[in-house]
Image (tube, grey):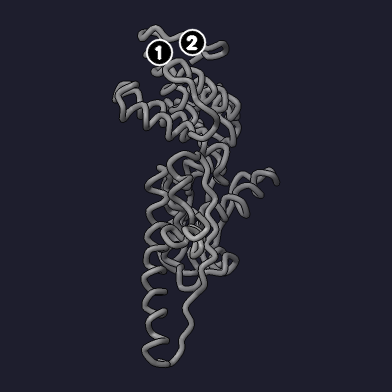
Amino acid sequence: MAAQYADLRLTDGGDYDSNGLEPVWKSQAVVLVSNAGGLFTQQSDQGLLWRIPRYQAIEERQARALRKRWLPCVIGLRQVTLADRIRAFVAKEYIQRARTAGQQQVTVLAGEVHRKMGLISRLPAVCSALRAGSFEVENRIKLEKADGPNQGASLRLTYRLLPASPGDLTALTPGELSAPDPAVRDPKVSEDDLARYRRCLDRLLDQIETLQGDAEGLVARIRRFGKTGRIPRKIEPLMLTVAEIRNASEHSRIPTSPDERLAAKHAMKAVLQWASQRGLKIPDGCTSQGY
């Protein structure tokens, strides 16, 4: 027996998966990835024995980059883009501060944002991100005026601050007050409601299959149930809507918009209707009243 293990060698997971991602991305709702790989340095050729590990390093770097690109797709997440970073920065440094100061509007200079973020030659990206309609929806603002070149540092954008919450009507114009805005009509959806919707989903799925431990996240569980036919095809995206909006509310630096929370509410209502028709017990606090 001793001879059998005389030349036993142990290595870490880097032989196959340098980042150690595969054991966890199939079962965890949140995955933190730290890449400790070194960067290439420029060196002159030192012969064949020097080039061989160099070739291996290039292959390893390619595999690592592929896995990092693959990870968000596998676990159902969207990669954070430069536009996301720009909008998050302006929301925090300009929009939120203007609201705190009680201002009715705020002006953003593209070149100033570019400089403060430490970007290099990315002015077109800054200008495009600040003109995006999603930026206005996410932050409850409306672009009133744009002065200067469309893609230049001197582009000056002036936004009017709309109500921070659906129930606050003070910043709306008469035309907006009469508009059929579902978020204004239905101001009941809060971050706490989103957390309650998630708990309801967990309890409903527990009636189909009891979760063994905490290894599987809610999104992964919903996808598995849909793939195996345990929930109907039309119900799976509704459940995912509720779960993903709740995840965004909890983990994203950008707050969910009233319309997004309202979408989660109506999706949850449809899920509860399906659960009732199937004969599942509606958990306490999850009745369709108020949805």
- Whether residue 62 sits left or right of residue 39 in the image: it is left
Q: Would you call the spot at circle 1 few (<14 residues within 10 Å), some (14-19), or many (20 or more)?
A: some
Relative vertical location of residue 280 with respect to residue 111 in this rendering, above or below: above
Secondary structure under the numbered disc 2 in the rendered image: loop
Residue depicted at x 47% and y 31%: 218
Asked if one can make out residue 229 in the rendered structure from this viewpoint, the answer is yes
Residue 53 at x, y percent in the picture: 41, 79
Residue depicted at x 46% and y 86%: 42
Q: Which mark is residue 282?
A: 2
What kind of residue is marked 1?
A: Ala
Question: Mark 1 and mark 2 in contact (Cβ < 8 Å)?
Answer: yes
Asked if one can make out residue 149 in the rendered structure from this viewpoint, the answer is no
The residue that label 1 is drawn on is 275
Residue 122 at x, y percent in the picture: 45, 68
How many marks on residues? 2
What kind of residue is marked 2?
A: Ile
Camera-nearest residue between 123 and 47: 47
Q: Which mark is residue 106?
A: none
Residue 208 at x, y percent in the picture: 42, 17
Residue 85 at x, y percent in the picture: 51, 56
Q: Quadrant of residue 152?
A: bottom left
Of the numbered discs 2 and 1, the one sitting upstream in the chain is 1
Camera-nearest residue between 54 and 126: 54
Relative vertical location of residue 197 with respect to residue 214 in this rendering, above or below: above
